[in-house]
Image (cartoon, grey):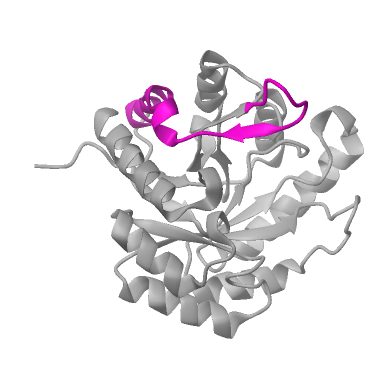
Amino acid sequence: MEEINMIRTGLLSVTFRKKTPEEIIRLVQQAGLDGIEWGGDIHVPHNDAKRAAEVGKWTKEAGLALTSFGSYYYTGGKTRGNSDNPRFENVLETAIALGVPAIRVWAGDRPSEEADEQWRRTVADDTRRIADLAAQAGITIDFEYHNHTLTDTPASAEQLLREIDHTNVRSNWQPPLEMDAAQRLDSLRGMLPWLANVHVFHWTPSLTEQRKLVQHPLAEGKEDWIAFLRTINQAGRSPFAMLEFVKGESDEQFLQDAATLKEAVAASE
């Protein structure tokens, strides 16, 4: 009988920046998750194809999927703060060596409310350029769905993807923290035509400190996640739902969150 649920589970390696790739692989195996996105900042540096091939080999030998390469490439270039944007050709070479089907990138480095039409065109043009390059290697370009970029609101994200209009460009999704559960579900529905993977966590704004977020066990947001994942299932999409950060960066909390995630996936069928 064909399996109805197609959502698989995983971990973003940036969750445990202090751990080695070998430690992360063992922990993901222990948790019974399906795959790993390797980050380009520490575990698989953007310009180190040899290291990428090594980590890719370890991951596959462990029976885990290579979900994507979490790069820190900003489409359109970096214009604020540290302006060191990796050369995309180096990012692509690393992703090929790693053996991933997707590269995660950022939709510029300006929030949508501060972006003029010229900046949006710059980001869109560069995204089409790198999407063409990646397509030659059979790799998709997946946006980070994140504040302070052009995917910081549902309207801006959808507008950008329509402006780019490229079959090799998708978007990840994660719950926008400033929204309630119903608004988050609406934002997910808007991304379904382009949905790549999903970043899973349960955070809330602090009640006592402005601009501070509080991490919670995923179990406290389990019902919301069942609704999110059920919406994805009903749309016939098959992303990886990947844990991103855990309370206290503890192994124990990660294992509990992984168990909760698997329960939510099963309940969403």
The answer to whether any part of residue 138 appears in the image is yes
User: Residue 184 in the image: x percent, y percent?
Assistant: 55, 22
Q: Is residue 168 magenta?
A: no
The residue closer to the viewer here, 231 or 170, is: 231
| Residue located 36% across and 50% down the image | 255
| Residue located 35% across and 39% down the image | 261
Q: Which residues are magenta?
A: 205-234
- In the image, is 81 to the left or to the right of 55? right
Q: Is residue 216 magenta?
A: yes
User: Residue 35 in the image: x percent, y percent?
Assistant: 38, 58
Q: Is residue 49 above or below residue 69?
A: below
User: Hey, which residue is sitting farthest left in the picture?
Assistant: 1
User: Residue 207 in the image: x percent, y percent?
Assistant: 68, 20
Residue 162 quadrant: top right
- In the image, is 40 to the left or to the right of 196? right
Q: How many marks?
A: 0
Q: Is residue 6 above or below residue 69?
A: above
Q: Is residue 145 above or below residue 240?
A: above
User: Hey, which residue is sitting farthest front in the picture?
Assistant: 208
The residue closer to the viewer here, 140 or 204, is: 204
* Quadrant in which the N terminus appears: top left
* Quadrant in which the C terminus appears: top left
| Residue located 30% across and 60% down the image | 30
The answer to whether any part of residue 245 appears in the image is no
